[in-house]
Amino acid sequence: MSTYFEEKNNFQNQIKRNIIFQFKKITLGISFVKIGFFLIFLTEFIFFFIFLLKFPTSWILSVIIGLIIFSFFSFFMILFYFQIKKPQQLDSLKKVFINSFRKSISSPQGSVEHHIAIANALKNLSFHFIGFEDLYFLNIKKIFHPFFKKLSAFFHKRDVFKMRESLILSAVEEHLYQIKETPIDLELHVSFARTYVMLGKIYMEAKKKEFLKKNKKFLEEKFDKAVKLAIEEFFILKSFAPNDPWILSELAKCYNSLGLLEEEVKEYENLLELSPEDYEVMFKLGIAYFKLKRNAQGLQVYEELKKVGFKKADQLLKDYSVTDLFN
């Protein structure tokens, strides 16, 4: 039995490795085109200025100008071709991953377990792409690493972002498909909420990155929508089990992941009303109080935890600060 599961895991891991390799191969193509034409343009312009200064009336100057125009035309034609072809290739690659992974799952298609497994595989693959834009030239000698890391990120950060987003959106589709079949399955709604949280985090991370600053407003709108959808899923769960501590805890974690501290505090306060002696929850509430600069409430939590001898109580003071004035 263990051999079967090991083979199954090895097969699934091989699928992921193959998809990552193919993604790198597809996205590298356009990078090499850009680098190659940059070198061609550089060479052409060097010769152009040499002949312009030394042989301004030479017929060779006319030839070089013609080559520059031809190179520009060729570059934009090839770039246009790649820009159309690349999204199609990446979409096909994603479909190959889904279909291959679907065949490796023992639970039948149409069951909750099957679609959650596919969604989790997509989220797991998206996780593997975190920071991938820095790793294209990993085998370059260490002395050149800083330069090639920046070059790698410059060419591939948008591709990696779009791939991660696309994978999570496909995970959303898996949930939507199954929800139409089993609309009140709580496990499915929990998984759906976590998927929206992950999508929100992708947009939140993208907002901080230099290359997407121009699209900040667009990303903020996407982030807000993902957050609302995640919260809505938790509200569905709360409607079925309004006093379930686990659901309140998951909702609080969701708010924490998305940086929504005020909402996180409310959920932990609700949890404490249900379980007043849950000191782990009290500890997390204290952290949130200090992060919000609600220091009086944070210190009350600290004092309460010290009274009961909670081991991690002193860690609360790491987030105790008076103001951001000195930052």
Image (tube, rainbow, N blue to C red):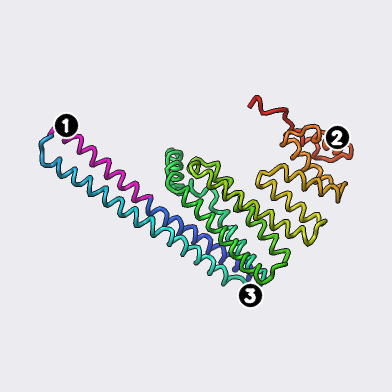
- Residue 10, x across and y down, in percent: 57, 65
Q: Please say if the residues under marks 2 and 3 sit with CB atoms less than 8 Å apart.
A: no
N-terminal of the pair, mark 1 or mark 3, is 1
Q: In which quarter of the image is the N terminus?
A: bottom right
Question: Residue flagged by tag 1: what amino acid is it?
Answer: Leu
Q: Which SS class for mark 1?
A: helix
Q: Is residue 165 toward the left or the right of residue 228 in the image?
A: left
Q: Residues within 10 Å of mark 2 (few under 14, many from 20)?
A: some
N-terminal of the pair, mark 1 or mark 2, is 1
- Residue 308, x across and y down, in percent: 89, 40
State the residue position of label 1. 53
Residues in magenta, as a range: 31-55
- Residue 280, can we see it? no
Q: Is residue 326 above or below residue 228?
A: above
Residue at figure coordinates x 85%, y 39% from the top left: 305
Number of callouts in the render? 3
N-terminal of the pair, mark 2 or mark 3, is 3
Question: Residue flagged by tag 3: what amino acid is it?
Answer: Pro
State the residue position of label 3. 108
Q: Which SS class for mark 2?
A: helix
- Image quadrant where residue 175 sits: bottom right
State the residue position of label 2. 303
Question: Residue flagged by tag 2: what amino acid is it?
Answer: Glu
Q: Residues within 10 Å of mark 1 (few under 14, many from 20)?
A: few
Magenta segment includes 272: no
| Distance between mark 1 and mark 3 Cα atoms | 74 Å
Q: Please say if the residues under marks 1 and 2 sit with CB atoms less than 8 Å apart.
A: no
Which residue reaches farthest bottom? 108
Q: Quadrant of the C terminus?
A: top right
Q: Is residue 196 toward the left or the right of residue 246 in the image?
A: left
Magenta segment includes 42: yes
